Image (spheres, rainbow, N blue to C red):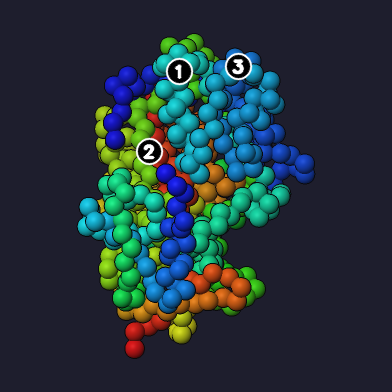
Amino acid sequence: MTMSALIKRGSVAIVGAAESDLGEVAPGFSAIDLMAQGVYRAVSDAGLNIKDIDGIFCATAQSRFAGVSLAEYLRLPEAFIDTTATGGSSFMGHLAKAQMAIQAGVCEVAVVAYGSTQRTLGRKNTSVAEYNPYETPFKPFLPPTAYAMAAARHMHEFGTTREQLAEVAVAARQWALMNPVAWEKKPLTVQDVLSARMLSYPLTIRDCCLVTDGGGAIVVTSAARAKSLKKPPVYLLGEAHVTTHSTISNMPNLVETGAKRSGELAYQRAGLTAKDIDVLELYDAFTINTILFLEDLGFCKKGEGGSFVSGGRIAPGGSLPVNTNGGGLSYCHPGMYGLFLLIEATRQLRGESGPRQVAGANTAIAHGNGGVLSSQDTVILGTAATL
Amino acid sequence: MANKQKSPYGVYLEYLQQDQLAYQFSTVANKAIFFPREVCPETGLDCLEWRVSKGLGTVYSTSAVHPRDGIVYNVALIDCDEGFRLMSCVEQISPDQVKIGMRVKFKTHTPEGDDPYPVFVPVA
C-alpha cells in the first residue's frame, strides 16, 4: 500500500469534538437529527459556525445518501461530500479523506459526523441484513457469531479463557463508571459476565457491545487555521486502512486482524511505535476485539492478550489506559462506534476527560473496526508537543 | 461477447444438486478458491476452473448459537482438505460438542422449496 508523499504528518487537526444525545433519545429523533446536533455542538466547541463548514464526511446505516441528507439539513449546497461506508471504521477513513481534501484545497473546514437511533427504532429496523448464499443458510447471528468464532479460535490456539475475555468487559465498566454520559451505571464482575445470557458461545451478552442510540461529530481543519481556534488542536499524525475480508468465512486468520498491517503503516507514518502511545481507544464491539487489537497493534505478543488484560492492567489505575470512555461495551454503541473513539482521544489529548483523564497524554491511538473484523483503520493523534 | 449462461453460484448449485461440493481452483496461482467468483482473487486473471471436493475437512472454528427463545444450533467454519474454507454447520452431535480440529464429512442438505446447501457430520 502506497501513501502519497503529499500527505503530511500533522497537516490537519481536530479542532472540535462532541457527542449528540446518547443512550436512548427522545421519540421521533432521526439519525440525521443526531448528526446535526453533533455537528452544531462540535463547531461550537471549535468556536466556529455551521456555515463555516465546506466539507461533509458522514455515514449511518439509516440513510442511503447520508451526505446528501446532512447537506440538505444544514443547507450547505456546495460542501464537498464523502459518504464512504466501511462499517464502524468509516469515521477513521473520513478523517483521512478530510486530510486529503484539506491538503488539496478542496475544503478547509470539514466535519465528520454520525447518527443512529437503533435503540429507539430497534436493530431490525435500522440495519439491513445482506443475503449471502454461502453464509445465510447457516443462520450465524451476525455480528456476534463471527466474533465468537474468533474468540473460540483464540482460546484454542493460545489457551485464552472466558475469564480473561470477561476482564475486558470489567475494565470497560470501571472506566464507564467515571463517565457521566455512559449508558451503564452499575459495577460489573467477571462472574457477572460469565453467568450472563449466552449469545453465541463463548460470548455472553456482557461480552457484547451495547445497543444504544447516539451520534456526534468532529471538526477538522488545516494546522494553520487550527492555531487560531478556541481549543488546543489535536493533530493527525498517521492513519492507515486495511481490508482483509468482508465475510467471516473469508477472514484469512481468525486470530490475526488487519490491524497488524494498518498499525504498522500508521506507526510508520506517525514516526512512532506502540511504546510511544499514551492512551488507547480500541473498537471494543466484543471483548475479543480488545485482546486482538492489543496484540496486533504491538502492545503485547500474539497470543498473550488474555493474560495481558488480566489483573486490571487496562482498567483505571492500571499500567495501560484502554477505552477510557467505557467503550462500546459500557459507554455507548449505536452500531458504528468509530467516531466515539476519535472524540474520546481528542478529549484525552486536550486534558478534558475529568476523573478519567490520563495525566500528561500527548499521543493517542484510535483504532476503528468495521464489519466482522473486516475493515481495520488505525489513527494516531498527538498534541502540539508531538509535531 | 454473449452473456454467460450460468453464474458462479448457479454452477455451484448444480453440483450441490448432484450431491457434490464444488470449489474453484486457480490454475495460475495453484490454489483453491472459495466462494465461487468470476475472476481469480489471487492473480486478477480469468483462470478459475471448477473442481469437486472429496468432502472431507476439519473444523477451523465453531460457535453454538443460543437464540433467545429457541433451540441451540451450531455454526462452524470448515477447512476442506483441498485448501478452501467455508461456513457450514456440524450436524448429528450436540452443538456444544463440535470441537475445533474435529474431522468432518460433507453431505447435502436440501430444505423444502429452497436451494440445497452443504452441511457436515463427524467422520465416524
Give percent across and percent down for residue B51.
31, 66
Same chain letter for marks 3 and 2: yes
Tally the marks: 3
Q: Which mark is residue A102?
A: 1
User: In the displayed structure, does residue A272 sit left or right of residue A181?
Assistant: left
Disc 2 to disc 1, how far (Cα)?
19 Å
Q: Is residue A88 above or below residue A200?
A: above
Residue name at image x 61 percent, y 51 percent: A128
Res A186 → quadrant: bottom right
Chain name for mark 1: A
Task: Determine whether the residue tagged by mark 3 lies in a helix, strand or loop.
Answer: loop
Disc 3 versus disc 1: nearer the observer: 3
User: In the displayed structure, does residue A300 sit left or right of residue A36?
Assistant: left
- Residues A252 and A302: in front is A252
Residue situated furthest right in the rendering: A27
Find disc 3 in the rendering and name its residue: A78
Q: What amino acid is at disc 2? A: His
Res A96 → quadrant: top left
Label 2 Cα neighbours within 10 Å, binned few <14 / some 14-19 / many ≥20: many
Find disc 2 in the rendering and name its residue: A241
